Amino acid sequence: MALLDLLRRKPEAKSPVARRRKRKTESGSAVLAWMEKSKVVAFAVFVLTVAAIFIVSFVGVGPAAFHILPNQEATIRIIADSDFSFTSAIQTTRNRERLLREVPPVYRVDLEPTDRFETHVRQVLADLNTLDDRWATLSEAERLRELSTIAENATTRGGLQVGIRDLAAIMNFGDAAARERLIVENGLYYVREIQRAGVYTPPGASGSGDDRDITLFNVRRDSGATTTVRVSTVESARTTLRIGLAAENTPPSVVTALFRLLGPGIAENLVFDMEETEALRARMLETMPPAIVRVEAGRSIIEPGTRVSAEQHEMLLAYQQHLNTNGQLISGLDQQVVGRILLVLGVIIVAGFYLRLEDAMTLRSNGRLALLASVLVVSLLLIRSTLEIGNTRLFETSPQTAALLPYVAPTAFAPILIAVLIGAGPAMFSGLLVSIFAAIIFGNRLDILVLSLLTASVASYACRKVRRRSRVVKAGWISGLVLAAFVTMLGLADGMPLDLLARAAIGGQATGLVTGIVVVGLLPLLEGLFKRTTDITLLELTDYNHPLLRRMQMDAPGTYHHSLMVASLSENAANAIGANSLLARVCCMFHDIGKLVKPDYFIENQRGGLNPHSGHSPSFSALVIKSHVKEGVDLAIKHKLPRPVIDVIRQHHGTTLIRYFYQRARDRAGKIEAGCTPDPHSASESTYRYDGPRPQFKESAIILMADSIEAASRSLQKVTPQAVEELIDSIVEEKISDGQIDDAPLTIREIALIKRSFTFTLLNSLHSRVVYPKADKPAERATATTSPTPIAPAEPESPTDAHTFRTAAGGGVS
């Protein structure tokens, strides 16, 4: 029993101090507020941005670090800072080609035709010697007939064109021994020696046969040795033969006959020896040293405005390798330091003027400025890293691939991030800044400037008002596709090799896709670090299964319905003036979450006619009503809602007067004669005003007006366009006269558009419904079946019936 009594015992009431719930607040709010608005912080961001961009874009970047493809137009002047030398592959190749052209071909002497010719001549000599025994006994006619037979046989056997008179002159010269000495020892000897030396027929020979036709040839002998000898042409060799025959004191007629017999033996006999020629060229190439090019300090390697030749490109690569090998760092700090700092300073000042004119909110927020500057600097660091990667050993063997790195630099990184986190306008301008400094980093290249700006513009346009993460990846892919297309066209115009062109296009496409994926991964980190809220995050908060919205549906259904109606009003009004409609909708869904703490104290959640305010003073009731703002901020921070939502919770009532309880307090203070004891502070207006602050941005001001208009619209007795317009005009004028929207950047035209949107939305949400007839009873249905007269729709017999019909028709509860 003691245990049961212990279990049944009610817990002791805790003291008010113990019951007090610890409110969850933002830590360091004062410091954060100071940092957000401080001009000192803004100036520090400005100075750090200029310094970081200068260091990234200029320090350590020298002309020798640039990679340029052959046949590209140079945009910079590169001068050697020190002496260096290198082995020129291009010059060596040219020397080899020149050597191959200068090495004469090798020939061999073909004596086989000479041997055959000598055989045929000896046969003629034998025939003449046979005829010699009968020569003296033959008549003139018989001699001619015999000589004719010998000539015909010589022509038939060996193709010798010898005449009868020539044979007769040789026969009359002497006996067989004399003819042997004349033909064999003298004539054939000269023929063989001339042929052994080599005879050739020059192209287009004129047949002059003078000494000018004698040429030096490489001739390979039977021993295998190759020597350079003087080789005669056919005509000059025959002249030599004639001179040699005449030198033997032979009669002219016999010399002529002998020359006609032996002359055909002089013929071209040099045969091109391919194998020996190649062997000779190989031996010459082996002994040829490589070409060494020596470059003195101060020599110009590349001049701006000129096409880079193959020799200049090779010299540039050698210079870069020389610097890397010797560990010489390019400082990039020279007499142009001041000019470069002023260049960066001028560009950042121009950016400041742009923000002042087109995006003043960013200029007023140090957080947005820091985000913008950080993304720009990180983007330039990635581009600089691309340049530095090309100077590593990874690309030593492929310098042409390193020259393609500017085309795959992630220039769309900053525009995509800024478009999602801040807006499309700042993203476009940031793309221009990134393009300018990317062109500077890669050597003042106009093509990089244009390609980067085009890619950034496409990426910024594709990311405007993005609400899905997949669209960010798609934007990166589209920017890469555009980059690949224009790189292809520029490459074709510059005559870039097709393999390099394909690699550049594929690399640009891959970079765009990877950039989109990386941005999607960085978005949550940057949103939390810089307190930014993107449309992607806002869209995720529209899920009705959010814990706060689910709790509101169960514990405060009237407030939940009210929030949905205010969301509809605010979203349409924001669309009408070009504000962020998604932000307005999400903020409306959470703006009254503070009512979850004490939902019964708000009339929309009261059921059964019970009013908790009946037993409390007006000041207490006003305190409870005002507390829903602080409670809402407490819940929003606890559930990590975005900053704009928390700001709307604070600002959606501004410093509005809680007029109902303020009037009750004034009435109670005036009823002294009724026996009441008035509170001297109960009628103070400050007690009955919300703590604020007043709305600071357009969406917050729209929600403030929509909240009041939706609540007041429930008191309309008759919904007509005139009544709705009068209600909206009166509430908006009251807010304006009370100064509630003085801090919001709304124009008179925008306020007129907002009121018109409110009117349209309310008339469509509060429209009347058709009154449905009641169901007939069975007996009445039978009577109606036999009755030929149609029955008109019945009107509701009581207010309760009318409410039932409106509910069944889908209308709202009044």
Image (spheres, rainbow, N blue to C red):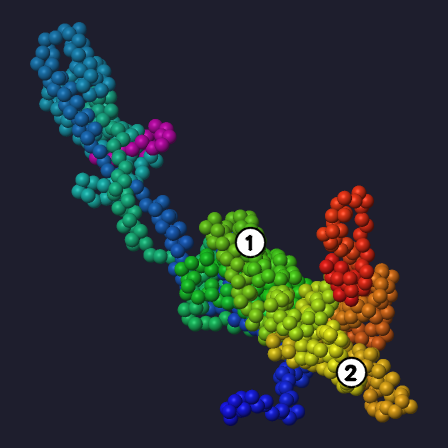
Q: Mark 2 touching mark 1, by CB under 8 A?
A: no
**Is residue 174 positioned above or below 382 on the image?**
above
**Is residue 636 positioned above or below 90 on the image?**
below
Asked if residue 598 is among those painted magenta in the image, a careful observer would answer: no
Kind of residue indicated by mark 1: Leu
**Prevailing secondary structure of the magenta residues:** loop
Find residue 481 and name its label.
1
Q: How far across and how far down the image is residue 800, in percent?
A: 78, 64
Q: Nearer the viewer, residue 341 or 588?
A: 588
Image quadrant assignment for residue 429: bottom right
Kind of residue indicated by mark 2: Ser
Badge 2 density bin: few <14, some 14–19, many ≥20, Cα 10 Å = few
Q: Secondary structure at mark 2?
A: helix
Asked if residue 208 is among those painted magenta in the image, a careful observer would answer: yes
The residue that appears at 67% across and 68% down in the rendered structure is 586
**Is residue 486 positioned above or below 244 on the image?**
below
Badge 1 density bin: few <14, some 14–19, many ≥20, Cα 10 Å = many
Mark toward the start of the polypeptide (2 vs 1)? 1
**Is residue 137 positioned above or below 676 on the image?**
above
Q: Is residue 387 visible in this depiction of the protein?
A: no
Q: Which residues are magenta?
A: 196-211
Q: Which residue is mark 2?
A: 614
Find residue 602 and name its label.
none
Image quadrant assignment for residue 109: top left
Q: Is residue 689 visible in this depiction of the protein?
A: yes
Q: How far across and how far down the image is residue 99, in percent?
A: 35, 48
The residue that appears at 83% across and 62% down in the rendered structure is 719
Judged left or right of residue 557, residue 202 is left
Q: Quadrant of the C terminus?
A: bottom right
The number of discs equals 2
The residue that appears at 63% across and 61% down in the rendered structure is 466
